[in-house]
Amino acid sequence: MNENGPPQESAAPGRLESGRIDYRELEAGGLTFRVPVSGYLFNNADCWAKVEGSRARVGISDFLQRSAVRVLSFEPPRAGLRYSIFDKICSLPTERLTLDVISPVSGELISINPDVVESPDLMHQDPYGRGWLVELELSDLDYDIEFLMDCEGYLELARAKLTSGGPRRSCPCTPRGAVYRRPDADPSR
């Protein structure tokens, strides 16, 4: 472990429900954070989307869940709600603070992970597999993808957060930090 030095990276094999996946690891402050090498897209709010066809599963990153200590519960939103990229999907109460789950993609909520409702610890045990939170029917992926990061981009963001004192609060920003406002968004919101 790297207690006080700069974040260190390594590669490690991982597992996902549908098969094996490879992770990159980042060590800092005595913790090791995993990021899938491929198949996942991340926003600046430490949430991920795994796109499969016209749908995406959404969850929180290993970086965010390890920074939060322990999520106490998951009270899901109801199916049928529509979200734009950077909308708040729900909040997760933890032992220290409340985390906002910020949508990495636009779409309609079609499914909730009942296993996480029953056992929120799945977010900690398997954040990129069995710990997913909701599934969305995608509505604007071609647009949304411009604001998302792959493994390398997210590792760079996580490194920056680690050297500046930890995860930042949710931010509707592009990967380069510009504030994002969807053209069709209500300006009074």
Image (cartoon, rainbow, N blue to C red):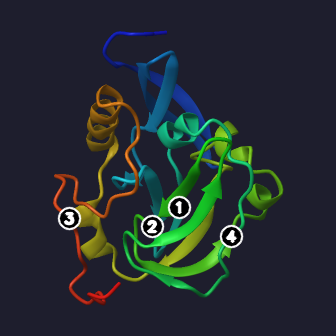
Choose the circle earlier in sequence order: 2 or 3: 2
**Mark 3 and mark 4: Cα distance apart in space:** 27 Å
Instruction: Name the kind of residue labelled 1 in the image.
Output: Val
- Tags 3 and 4 touching, CB below 8 Å: no
Give the labeled residue for mark 1.
58
Choose the circle earlier in sequence order: 4 or 2: 4
Give the labeled residue for mark 2.
103
Of residues 63 and 17, the one drawn nearer to the viewer in this rendering = 63
Indicate which label's residue lies in the foreground, 3 or 4: 3
Choose the circle earlier in sequence order: 2 or 1: 1
Give the labeled residue for mark 4.
76
Label drawn at residue 43? none
Instruction: Name the kind of residue labelled 3 in the image.
Output: Val
Please give the count of numbered marks on the rendered protein: 4
Q: In the rendered view, does 95 fall on the left or right side of 9?
A: right
Label drawn at residue 179? 3
